[in-house]
Image (cartoon, rainbow, N blue to C red):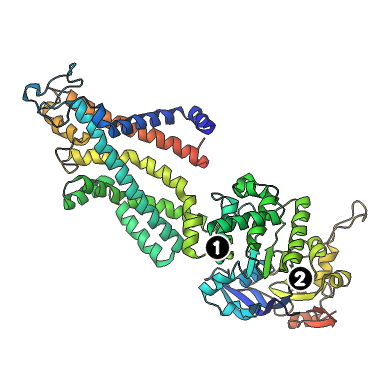
């Protein structure tokens, strides 16, 4: 099966007064229809910037996508002009954001906002667009969708708003859905519901999902494959199962070890990765993780490790492992 | 409805302001019905007649009934106040929206022009404009509207600058909405609350400016009865001999401006809770 989303060599920089910030460097991945790919990493490792680059929503200036290609069903988004890109957004590639509380306009009814999206991309009557809005709300399992469509965002709970956002994002059946931390702002029970919902819709509609998160629990639950990012680079890639069972990169090893375990005994210190993510305008010469890495050798300070296949379907960028 | 009652109880002064404005607007609309006499008919025998049961608040030098002239004068004041506020706020809002949303050199130029305009007092600028356009009702409205534009444009621009960073504006871009549509659908409606407050707050000052312009002889020309001119015509000559010619137009102006300000203040508190108690 040909991948729906093919990203290769994507690089995004920000020109700032403090120098050039390399937010995304040479990131490549692909997602098939109906597949979920998770992008994981700490705050500031370039996950959201990768997502915004895919949508071409990087604020420019100061941001600039310097290299690479983003192909959705064969069309390279980075080669499109702005009107062409506008047609793709929403209809081919859609995004849901972290904050459901502020991602809807408080002055418009939820139904109107979804209908607005539909009429933007499809030549349908106002009435048909409204009917689609109700249908989508029903689809994301919002009870009494006819009534809810006429309500304003403040009349809904956070979980319901996030579902409304998902309804909006999927209203035009995009081939790719980018979910940027879709559950971070929600409490745990609602998180599970929203993740289940995204999973079900993905199967129903055959949407390729790019799930951006720092929550490894969420990844284990929902993703087929995952990539790990560190300081703007992809450092590890593989199936979720494989990566959780046997991580190759010390960074992912560290992340997995940091998950608190049940039954570890009271008073045991939580594990952590020492240090912080380096500033993206001042990266070390070698491996960006080397200063925090317990397994680092001299070579790690010297050269950036290439991404190599460690096992079939499992690649990591590390000199040591 | 219950909302209205709740706010009415919380802002009693606002209610008084609203009542004054309502009475003022109704008087203006039904001036023809309410006024006991024709405001333009002269009567030499009644020249400078003191208040009596025929002329409730007296008559002017030409024997025209003051009450009727005051009632018809409300029309002029209302027309000028509403006209100038609508034109000024409308243009100002459009400029502010474009300036804040587009940014760049357009924003830079608009803001510098606004600063230049704001460095002149409202009345002085209105004076210069009427002096060059010539006195008429329309010109008075234009002259008062233009100085309002920069104030409104700056407030709306500041508002737009914060609105355009909001998530739903970003989300609208992510679903493929164009810039113009985002500005109209998502940004502009959210600036309406400050716009309404600002417009109401300026209602009072437009009435005052009209009165001042007319007082200086540059406002609404004869034979329209304007409160400001009624005041100016009589102030110097008749303040001693026929004080009712001065007192009542003055009272009317003060009362309406007072009402507009009370209402504007209450509206600001209601629509913008950050500035409230």
Looking at the rendered structure, whether the residues under marks 1 and 2 are on a common chain is answered as: yes
Q: Secondary structure at mark 1?
A: loop
Q: What residue did someone put label 1 on?
A: A124
User: Is residue A16 in sight in this rendering?
Assistant: no
**Farthest left residue?**
B44
From the viewer's perspective, tell me whether residue B246 is left or right of residue A315: left
Where is residue A160 drawn, in percent x and y? 68, 50
Label 1 resides on the chain identified as: A
Q: Is residue B90 above or below residue A70?
A: above
Dot 1 alpha-carbon crowd within 10 angstroms: few under 14, some 14 to 19, many 20 or more: some
- Return the x and y of residue B162 as percentages of the image width and height: 51, 55
The answer to which of marks 1 and 2 sits earlier in the sequence is 2
Q: Position of residue A207 (x, y in %)?
A: 71, 68
Q: Nearer the viewer, residue A284 or A179?
A: A179
Label 2: which residue? A35
**Closest to the observer, A303 or A145:** A145
């Amino acid at each position: 099966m040909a991948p729906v989303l093919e990203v290769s060599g994507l690089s995004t920089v920000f020109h700032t007064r403090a120098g050039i910030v390399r937010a995304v460097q040479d990131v490549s991945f692909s997602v098939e229809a109906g597949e979920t790919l998770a992008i994981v990493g700490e705050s500031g490792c370039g996950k959201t910037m990768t997502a915004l680059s895919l949508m071409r929503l990087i604020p420019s200036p100061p941001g600039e996508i310097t290299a690479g290609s983003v192909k959705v069903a064969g069309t390279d988004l980075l080669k499109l002009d702005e009107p062409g890109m506008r047609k793709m957004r929403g209809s081919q590639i859609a995004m849901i954001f972290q904050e459901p509380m502020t991602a809807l306009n408080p002055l418009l009814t939820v139904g109107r906002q979804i209908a607005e999206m539909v009429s933007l991309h499809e030549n349908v009557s106002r009435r048909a667009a409204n009917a689609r809005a109700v249908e989508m709300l029903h689809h994301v399992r919002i009870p009494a969708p006819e009534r809810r469509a006429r309500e304003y965002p403040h009349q809904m709970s956070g979980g319901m708003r996030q579902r409304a956002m998902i309804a909006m994002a999927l209203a035009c059946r995009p081939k790719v859905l980018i979910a940027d931390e879709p559950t971070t702002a929600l409490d745990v029970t609602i998180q599970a519901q929203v993740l289940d919902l995204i999973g079900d819709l993905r199967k129903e509609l055959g949407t390729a999902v790019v799930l951006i998160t720092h929550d490894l629990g969420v990844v284990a639950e929902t993703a087929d494959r995952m990539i790990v990012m560190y300081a703007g680079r992809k450092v590890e890639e593989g199936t979720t199962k494989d990566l959780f069972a046997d991580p190759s990169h010390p960074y992912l090893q560290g992340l997995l070890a940091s998950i608190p375990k049940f039954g570890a005994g009271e008073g045991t210190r939580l594990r952590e990765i020492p240090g912080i993510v380096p500033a993206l305008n001042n990266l070390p010469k070698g491996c960006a993780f080397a200063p925090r890495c317990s397994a680092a050798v001299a070579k790690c300070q010297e050269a950036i490790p290439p991404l190599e296949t460690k096992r079939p379907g499992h690649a990591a960028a590390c000199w040591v492992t | 409805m219950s909302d209205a009652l709740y706010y009415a109880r919380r802002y009693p002064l606002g209610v008084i302001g609203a009542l004054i404005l309502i009475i003022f607007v109704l008087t203006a609309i039904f001036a023809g019905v309410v006024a006991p006499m024709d405001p333009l008919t002269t009567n030499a025998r009644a020249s400078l007649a003191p208040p009596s049961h025929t002329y409730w608040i007296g008559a002017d030098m030409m024997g025209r009934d003051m009450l009727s002239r005051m009632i018809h004068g409300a029309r002029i004041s209302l027309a000028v106040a509403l006209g100038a506020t609508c034109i000024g706020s409308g243009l100002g809002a459009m400029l502010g929206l474009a300036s804040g949303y587009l940014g760049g050199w357009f924003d830079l130029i608009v803001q510098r022009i606004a600063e230049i305009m704001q460095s002149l007092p409202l009345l002085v600028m209105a004076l210069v404009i009427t002096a060059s356009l010539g006195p008429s009702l329309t010109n008075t409205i234009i002259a008062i509207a233009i100085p309002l534009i920069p104030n409104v444009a700056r407030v709306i621009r500041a508002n737009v600058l914060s609105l355009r960073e909001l998530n739903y504006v970003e989300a609208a871009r992510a679903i493929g909405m164009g810039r113009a549509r985002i500005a109209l659908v998502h940004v502009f409606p959210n600036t309406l609350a400050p716009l309404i407050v600002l417009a109401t707050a300026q209602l009072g000052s437009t009435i005052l400016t009209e009165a001042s312009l007319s007082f200086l002889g540059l406002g609404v020309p004869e034979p329209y009865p304007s409160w400001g001119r009624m005041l100016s015509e009589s102030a110097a000559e008749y303040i001693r001999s026929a004080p009712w010619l001065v007192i009542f137009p003055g009272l009317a102006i003060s009362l309406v401006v007072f009402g507009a300000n009370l209402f504007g203040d209450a509206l600001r508190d209601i629509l913008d809770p950050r500035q409230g108690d």
